[in-house]
Image (cartoon, grey):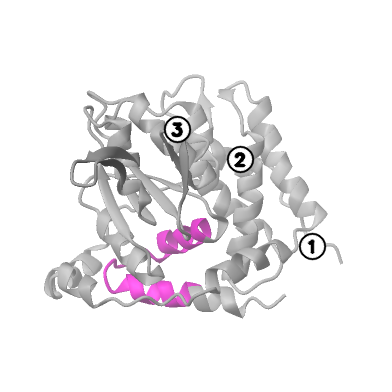
Amino acid sequence: MQTQSFVRLKEKILQNCGCIIVGKENVIEQIVVCLIASGHILLEDVPGTGKTMLLRAFARSIGGEFRRIQFTPDLMPSDLTGINFFNQKKSEFEFRPGPLFAQVILADEINRATPRSQSALLEVMEEKQITVDGVTYAMKEPYLVMASQNPLESYGTFPLPEAQLDRFFMRLRLGYMTREQEIGVLRRPDTRTLLEELQPVVEDGELEFLRESYPQVRVSDDIAAYMMDLVDATRRSELLLTGISTRGSLALYRACQILAALRGRDYVIPEDVKQEALCVLPHRLTLVNQGHLDNVMFLQGLLDEIPVPLEKL
């Protein structure tokens, strides 16, 4: 398998997005993993860390239409999917598409909307289609949803249920820039000006080719067993109400294959599993008692305990 195409795509997107977002190469790499895997992202971070600008830059890089949706308690499902309205001039009903018909969607503060509105995302995330009044509309590829949550404020929010959390391919956090990086951002031109200058870097058919190619990345029996040791450990743990689902284990397997290809390898190594596990699995876990332990800390503990497969000579 030739992995140069994967490396080339990653480098082009990293360079393009790096003009807008500084020091977040690892996060951008994971978004590329999601894009190739046809997955979606849950982003948990404090306001003002560049979530919207990052996704705008990413949308421009892949040549996709971007829409930002501010989720609020009074948001209705039809505000997302679109409605059929009566055109008095034509004396007939016409469909007016909602913002979910874009290709790159930022669902900002998704936990501020009611469960009814949150569920409007389920069909489009899973099936890449929207049904309105019995008519189904297919979404244009590529299609990526990134939903954000503010981890600091819980008043007046509607937490996502476990079944809906499990549909997100991975959970990411941007975090703050370093002091030197932020000083550089302060001195450069306005971000909106830089954003307008960005051009698409993904060629027609390039993404489809990579989606067809990544399953060729080899996963040895030992690496697959290592993944299942981790999954089984979550299912047996008395500290968890729910362990990793089959959807979660499949997501980990695919993410490791894509990450290996993006780094120029046609085979998966244990380091791929360790890195992707911390992005793909934590939001799928439910601890019995949070206390001083969160999902990432719990999973890191399992990764430290489970023996890593060694290369056989």
Q: Is residue 194 left or right of residue 217?
A: left
Residue 137 can be seen, yes or no: yes
Determine crowd level at label 3: few under 14, some 14-19, many 20+ residues with C-alpha closer than 10 A.
Answer: some
Q: In front of the other: label 1 or label 2? A: 2
Image quadrant containing the C terminus: bottom right
Q: Are marks 1 and 3 in contact (CB under 8 Å)?
A: no
Query: Observer-nearest residue: 189 or 26?
Result: 189
Q: How many marks?
A: 3
Q: In front of the other: label 2 or label 3? A: 2
Q: Where residue 202 sits in the image (x, y, percent)?
A: 45, 75
Alpha carbon separation for disc pair 1 and 3 = 32 Å
Q: Is residue 260 left or right of residue 229?
A: left
Q: Where residue 154 sits in the image (x, y, percent)?
A: 26, 27
Checking the image for residue 294, the label placed there is: 3
Please tell me which residue is depicted at 34% across the width and 53% down the height of the picture.
174
Amino acid on which the number 2 mark rests in the picture: Gly
Q: Is residue 200 left or right of residue 112?
A: right
Q: Is residue 297 left or right of residue 254?
A: left
Q: Where residue 301 sits in the image (x, y, percent)?
A: 57, 39
Query: Observer-nearest residue: 305 or 161?
Result: 161
- Mark before the other along the chain sequence, 1 or 3: 3
In the rendered structure, which segment of residues is drawn in magenta?
10-35
Is residue 220 in the magenta section?
no
Checking the image for residue 248, the label placed there is: 2
Amino acid on which the number 3 mark rests in the picture: Asp
The secondary element bearing badge 3 is classed as loop
The secondary element bearing badge 2 is classed as helix
Residue bearing mark 1: 311
- Image height check: is 123 above or below 15? above
Please tell me which residue is depicted at 24% across the width and 68% down the height of the picture.
181
